[in-house]
Amino acid sequence: MAIYNKVADAPKTPFYYYDLGSLQSTLNCCLEEAVKYNYQVHYALKANVEKPILAKISACGMGADCVSGWEVQAAIDNGFHTSKIVFAGVGKSDDEIEFAIKNKIFCFNCESLEEIEVINNSAKKMGSVVTIALRINPSVEPDTHKYIATGQSESKFGISYPEIKQTLDKITELKNIEIKGLHFHIGSGIVNLANFKELALKVNDINDWFLSRGVEIEHLNMGGGLGINYNDPDSEPIVDFKGYFSTFAQNLKPKANQSVHFELGRSIVAQCGELLTRVLFSKTTASGEKFLIVDAGMTELIRPALYSAKHKIENISAKVDNRDNNIERYYIGGPICESSDIFAYDIEFPLSKRGDLLAIRSTGAYGSIMSSHYNLRPTAPAYFSE
Ligand code: LLP
């Protein structure tokens, strides 16, 4: 059942709605499981940066995972302690690097030798010594869409196996950086926990290799990537954090003095949000496809157009009026001048009419944050349960 149900009083569509109670329950569960193993969780801001959401997450003591200077700024502005901010990203600009050094963040997750040399030079100029983690590309093939898989041998992310030794030899000469961590992230939207087991086992070997070279690794950062149930969000409003963290606890072997960190985005915020939209028109194509054209489009939610992602859609008006037993087959598309602006293809859906309020579920992560102004559309507003 959709989170939002006030059909008559609904604000102008399209809009995002977030249930902060559901977010809090998710945070509680995540931390309860992580604390069992003394794991530290950083929230990946790239998933959603709405202020009430960041306020709740920072208040529960999580750290922040940022991929731009602007995200570092947002983390600081919204209550995350700088000593818990990590800064990743394959292309950090000089300004972003200097901003993060000035703010004394916990760690830079570094993706190439050249980047490390630039960070070292900036740190030298600023009279600092900066903590870094090496992001190693572990060459694990995750079960997810190719656009959000990041840890395979051909992807642009991380330092590849053949480059590790040369990178290490070079950076041990640099005086303004200290390698204290190893960082990994194999991809996003992963529900097959065996992928994380494979990662953990590879990290054990990599960790041993670094220690054998005399590098004192203090923390292992396993990245994020835990997927959620998009097909049936009500059956799994909170993901299996227990299974996720215990997969690492059973397979990852940190040394006695090493802390273990995670960077979770989607699994924390996806299920607490949904996109509300109204049916504008119904039409049938020459070849018989029945379309519902709605007032939200790929400008508000690009995931279906970009990754062929499937989000559950509900007709809230039909449910409230008790007319949801009359089932049709529909394509549901937005108003944008792109043929990929389709949210659903040929799905079973209640017979719908102009003005019906629909909820596109599980859009709390990578929804509003990836929106655009294409066709000069304004930003859809966000409303919160509290
Ligand atoms: N750490 C790093 C280094 C990452 O690149 C990401 C996500 C995360 C953590 C958080 O991953 P999560 O726990 O959210 O899976 N726009 C795409 C997802 C892109 C994810 C990019 N990196 C989508 O809508 O599915």
Image: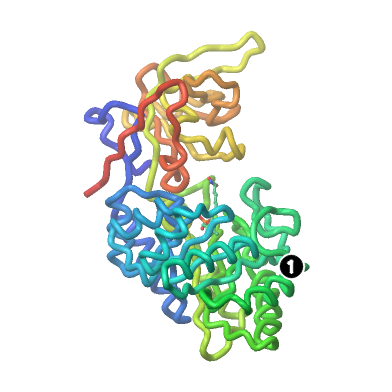
Which residue does the image show at 39% across and 67% down from the upper left?
63
Residue 144 rendering spot, x and y as whole percentages:
65, 51
Which residue does the image show at 56% across and 39% down from the upper left?
310
Q: Quarter of the image holding residue 285?
A: top right
Left or right of 145: which side holds 320?
A: left
Which residue does the image show at 67% across and 59% down from the upper left?
151
Residue 228 rendering spot, x and y as whole percentages:
52, 54
Left or right of 19: which side holds 167?
A: right
Q: Is residue 189 visible?
A: no
Q: Is residue 223 visible?
A: yes
Say which of 276 and 85 sits in front.
85
Which residue occupies the extreme top position in the image?
A: 286
Say which of 155 and 121 sits in front.
121
Left or right of 185: which side holds 362?
A: left
Q: Quarter of the image holding residue 341?
A: top right
Say above or below: 133 vs 18: below
Q: Secondary structure at mark 1?
A: helix
Residue 111 rendering spot, x and y as whole percentages:
61, 62
Q: Which residue is mark 1?
A: 163
Q: Amino acid at mark 1?
A: Glu
